[in-house]
Image (cartoon, rainbow, N blue to C red):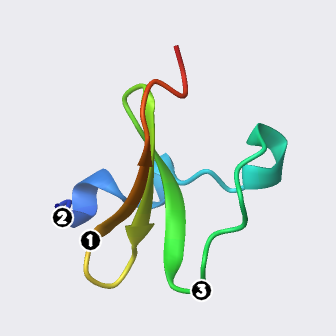
Amino acid sequence: MTLGSGFYSNRYWINDPWRYRLPEPFPGTRWIRYYNDVLLVDTFSGEVVDVIYDFFW
């Protein structure tokens, strides 16, 4: 699955993943808030690497 760049722009980034007890993202990836879910997204391709469903409820 891939996302359009508008869905993983910096306004959706989780800049402090340790605050939410998320693992440190790999280089070139970012944790993104997507509705109630958290996605680990490759910032170059938009590919979703990992998903945590219903993280924010």
Going by the numbered disc 2, the residue's amino acid type is: Thr
> What residue is pinned by disc 1?
47
Estimate the x, y position of residue 3 in percent, counting from the top left: 20, 60
Q: Residues within 10 Å of mark 3 (few under 14, many from 20)?
A: few
Contact flag, marks 1 and 3 (Cβ < 8 Å): no
Q: What residue appears at the point 40 percent right and 66 percent down from the top-left corner? A: 41
For residue 34, above or below residue 44:
above
Contact flag, marks 3 and 2 (Cβ < 8 Å): no
Estimate the x, y position of residue 49 in percent, counting from the top left: 38, 67
Under tag 1, what secondary structure? loop
Q: Residues within 10 Å of mark 1 (few under 14, many from 20)?
A: some
Under tag 2, what secondary structure? loop
Q: CA distance from mark 2 to mark 1?
A: 4 Å
Q: CA distance from mark 3 to mark 2?
A: 18 Å
Q: What residue appears at the point 45 percent right and 24 percent down from the top-left corner? A: 54
Mark before the other along the chain sequence, 2 or 1 = 2
> What residue is pinned by disc 3?
27
For residue 10, above or below residue 55:
below
Mark before the other along the chain sequence, 3 or 2 = 2
Going by the numbered disc 1, the residue's amino acid type is: Glu
Question: Residue 2 — which label?
Answer: 2
Q: What residue appears at the point 82 percent right and 43 percent down from the top-left corner? A: 19
Going by the numbered disc 3, the residue's amino acid type is: Pro
Q: CA distance from mark 1 to mark 3?
A: 14 Å
Q: What residue appears at the point 47 percent right and 51 percent down from the top-left corner? A: 32
